[in-house]
Amino acid sequence: MKIRTLTAGLLAACLALTACGKEGGPSDGGDGGNGNGDTAALSYEVAEDVTVEGSPTFDQMKKTGHVVVGVKDDQPNLGYKDPTSGEYSGFDVEIARLISAKLGFDPKKIEYKAVPSAGREQAIINGDVHYYVGTYTINDKRKQQISFAGPYFVAGQGLLVAKDNEDIKGKDDLKGKKVCSVSGSTPIQNVRDEGLHQPGGEIVELQTYSQCVSELLNGQVDVVTTDDAILLGYAAQQPDELKVVGEPFTEEPYGVGLPKEDDALRDKVNDILEEAMEDGTWQEIYDATLGKSGTQAEMPEIDRY
Ligand code: GLU
């Protein structure tokens, strides 16, 4: 009994340090510093003889023999394409792989399509992607055009500033500032609706968050705002230059974007996510990606609207 307790204690210490038996210390997440987590250990059994009765999207996948998934490619720990290897990694990418495997398609054969925030609805409507997994907030406006499975995670809007910035500590400090966010995103809409930058400030609207981060590093904007999960990834990549400040001030439930009329596929993806929560797969994915920084989370309850 004593030995067991000791082992458990050691294990807990290892987990807390995230460095036991691996190269790279806690500061780089144990992944050699690329900020993409340690996902090498994750793999998903590819389901056999899958049927999704009445799903035109699934029929399409079957016909072509592969899955086209819409993702982000510039969001470390979430959806990130390694510029050298071309490999995709991150929490959202793993969720996409899990779904593919449970639909009967080897995740190795996924065709990834990077689609920025403003292009998501149209990419799904056009059939350019079979499904989309990329920090995609479920909301009523978007539900008019597409449908969502999930939520599989809940983020909140946050603020990213230069490390030496002392005057922005929360959303009430944005007055008169240059605030950068992305076209077609909920955070930019929120700043606009609430006039958080007013009086005297400016919204700088770009296509991707990595473009906003470049502007911040160049001193062209004062602050980048979007989901805390996204901002923490950038801050972890450049901890000497950037920091996330304040408390999250919205709720951003992430869903898997699907064609609007395809209720059968939505039900199936909801089943897949629910099972991943129950059998611990979701937690494994979280721990190997977003959870690398030491944060904890639980999967929210599926909303079968
Ligand atoms: N979750 C927010 C949204 O869906 C912000 C992140 C993003 O643009 O992907 O608009």
Image (tube, grey):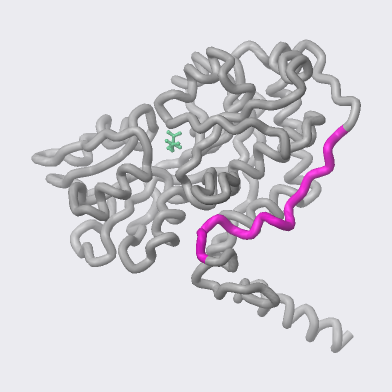
Q: Nearer the viewer, residue 221 or 13?
A: 221
- The magenta segment: 33-47
Location of residue 45 in the rendering, given as x and y in whole percent from the top left corner: 83, 42
Location of residue 261 in the rendering, given as x and y in whole percent from the top left corner: 63, 11
The C terminus is located in which quarter? Answer: top right
Residue at (63, 33) in percent of width and height? 150
Magenta span includes 38 = yes
Furthest residue toward front: 84
Residue 219 left/right relative to 303: left
Query: Ligand 1 shows up in which quadrant of the image?
Result: top left
Which of the 4 image quadrants contains residue 102? Answer: top right
Location of residue 50 in the rendering, given as x and y in whole percent from the top left corner: 86, 25
Residue 278 left/right relative to 21: right
Where 65 sits versus 133, above or below?
above
Residue at (81, 30) in percent of width and height? 104
Where 28 sits versus 45, above or below?
below
Magenta span includes 57 = no
Residue 65 left/right relative to 80: right
Magenta: main secondary structure equals loop
The N terminus is located in which quarter? Answer: bottom right
Furthest residue toward bottom: 2
Where 20 sits versus 140, above or below?
below
Q: Nearer the viewer, residue 215 or 288?
A: 215
- How many marks the image carries: the answer is 0
Furthest residue toward left: 200
Location of residue 193 in the rendering, given as x and y in whole percent from the top left corner: 27, 30
